[in-house]
Image (cartoon, rainbow, N blue to C red):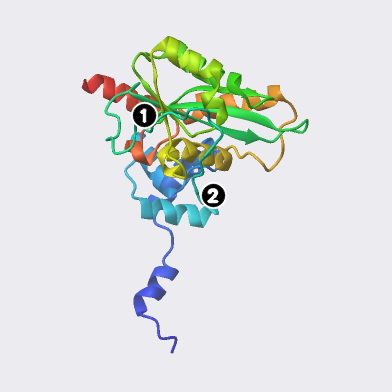
Amino acid sequence: MLGLPRSSYYHAAAPPSRRDDHLAAPVDRIFHENRSRYGYRRIARELMHRGLDCGGHAVRRIMRRQGLRALQPRHFVPRTSDGKASRPSPNLLAGAPPPEACDRVWAGDITFIPCIGGWLYLAVVIDLFSRKIIGWKLACRMDGTLVAGALEQAIRSRHSHGTIFHSDRGSQYSSSCFREVLRREGFRQSMSGRANPYDNATTESFIGTLKSELPIGKAPFKSLAEAERELFAYIDAYYNSRRLHSSLGYRSPCQFEAASATAT
């Protein structure tokens, strides 16, 4: 009468399996440990890391039955600045293969962070090989000292001589104080082509992930100090160390770097 196959009825009427009951608690625990940031694919991988073999379809079924819904990422549309950079640097990444080791190519970008007292500005530096955020700085002004501060933080913990530093054409990246750090440390500067946001898409993708998962924008931070604490907890304690990245074979940036160092 309903025009449905008999199997549909039995599938809908079937009670949850004992296996689902056994995995319900670990799925719930991983979901809340990651503050609703993990969907069924990442939860399935995390279960495997913990020695529990479970496919993605089973995890999705368990999440649906438990009413667990992950934060939905924003639609990612990369943007870039055709900027006001004086004497823009050439694009050294055009046509080049992806980096094959850490500290070959770093990239930077800036984003706005809402605060009750006014906008804050976050500059980040990312290693394009491992996707690890290796430097960041938050400030009340968006100028050359902001991006130079993020770069200085990265330099203190990494080997940088001969590294390419890539960014869009924002004026901050052509400022004298920023270019002085590049010159002093032996960087080669690279900038995106005009009207080509995909040249810096990896860094902008991180910013989209940050704003979806923190999440930034639902409620402004009360102060610069509070914003710094929350960003440290997300970037250093979670994103770099624990968050599984599908592009890294479902490993965190720190795990990916450690595995790469062992392989070499």
Q: Residue at x 48, y 43 (%)?
A: 38
Q: Residue at x 41, y 75 (%)?
A: 9
Q: Position of residue 246 (x, y in %)?
A: 37, 41
- Residue placed most toward the observer, 140 or 27: 140
Instruction: Give the distance between the C-alpha atoms of the residues marked 1 and 2, in whole angstroms.
Output: 22 Å
Can residue 253 be seen in this snapshot? yes
Q: Please tell me whether mark 1 sits on a helix, a strand or a loop.
A: loop
Q: Residues within 10 Å of mark 1 (few under 14, many from 20)?
A: many
Q: Which mark is residue 130?
A: 1
Can residue 51 be seen in this snapshot? no
Q: Which mark is residue 202?
A: none
The image shows a total of numbered marks equal to 2
Q: Position of residue 152 (x, y in %)?
A: 50, 14
Q: Quadrant of the N terminus?
A: bottom left
Q: Position of residue 190 (x, y in %)?
A: 40, 28
Q: Is residue 209 left or right of residue 46?
A: right
Q: Which residue is mark 2?
A: 74
- Residue placed most toward the observer, 49 or 215: 215
Pointer 1 or 2: first along the chain: 2
Q: Residues within 10 Å of mark 2 (few under 14, many from 20)?
A: few
Q: Which residue is outermost to the right?
A: 117
Q: Is residue 197 above or below residue 124?
A: below
Q: Quadrant of the C terminus?
A: top left
- Residue placed most toward the observer, 158 or 107: 107
Q: Residue at x 43, y 58 (%)?
A: 16
Q: Which residue is outermost to the front?
A: 87
Q: Is residue 263 left or right of residue 56?
A: left
Q: Please tell me whether mark 2 sits on a helix, a strand or a loop.
A: loop
| Badge 1 amino acid | Ser
Q: Position of residue 226 (x, y in %)?
A: 69, 25
| Badge 2 amino acid | Arg
